[in-house]
Amino acid sequence: MPPVKIVDPAMLREALRDIAQPVIMHYYTSDVESWYSLAEHQLLEEIASASEYITLQVYAERWDAQREAHVGIARTPAIALYGERDTGIRYYGTPDGYELATFLSTLRAIAAGTPGLRPDTLAHLRQLTQPVHLEVLVSPT
């Protein structure tokens, strides 16, 4: 039986059609497969196959504290997103359901090399003198 498509490939291609620069998704997952990790991996494969500019690299090994600290992830599953450089964006969990549109928008912004923020917001952020750790939690309810 062929694998079930998690999302419509035509919808993904349309959502990512304007990407013209490389985006790399580094996917860190457990070395113990589960239904959840298989579904997440499949979704990321489908996203990567929707654009010639998106690449998926999978790291499915035992937790390597030194490597993970170097990359800046605290737990798995995690997706580290890269454009021309490391964006610092780390996505935890599966970018599915309501989060999919936001995740695809993030990929487009990375490819465009723009954060999608207003100029006054960028000016305020440039005034920060110390690193900031920001986590956004999303719940479907």
Image: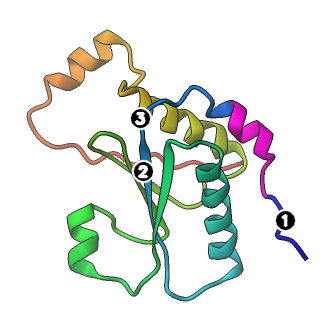
Q: Amino acid at mark 3?
A: Ile
Farthest residue to the front: give it: 52
Left or right: residue 53 versus residue 6 is left
Left or right: residue 121 versus residue 127 is right
Mark sitting on residue 24: 2
Residue displayed at 41% across by 35% down: 110
- State how far apart marks 1 and 3 are (Cα): 29 Å
Which tag, 1 or 2, sits closer to the chain's start?
Answer: 1
Image quarter where the N terminus lies is bottom right
Mark sitting on residue 120: none
Residue displayed at 70% across by 37% down: 13
Q: Amino acid at mark 1?
A: Val
Residue displayed at 49% across by 81% down: 30
Image marks 2 and 3: residues in contact by CB distance under 8 Å: no
Image marks 1 and 3: residues in contact by CB distance under 8 Å: no
- State how far apart marks 1 and 2 are (Cα): 24 Å
List the residue tagged with mark 3: 110
In the rendered image of this protein, does residue 113 appear above or below residue 33? above
Image position, residue 139 (x, y; %): 63, 50
Mark sitting on residue 4: 1
Q: Residues within 10 Å of mark 3 (few under 14, many from 20)?
A: many
In the rendered image of this protein, does residue 113 appear above or below residue 58? above
Q: Amino acid at mark 2?
A: Ile
Element type at marker 2?
strand
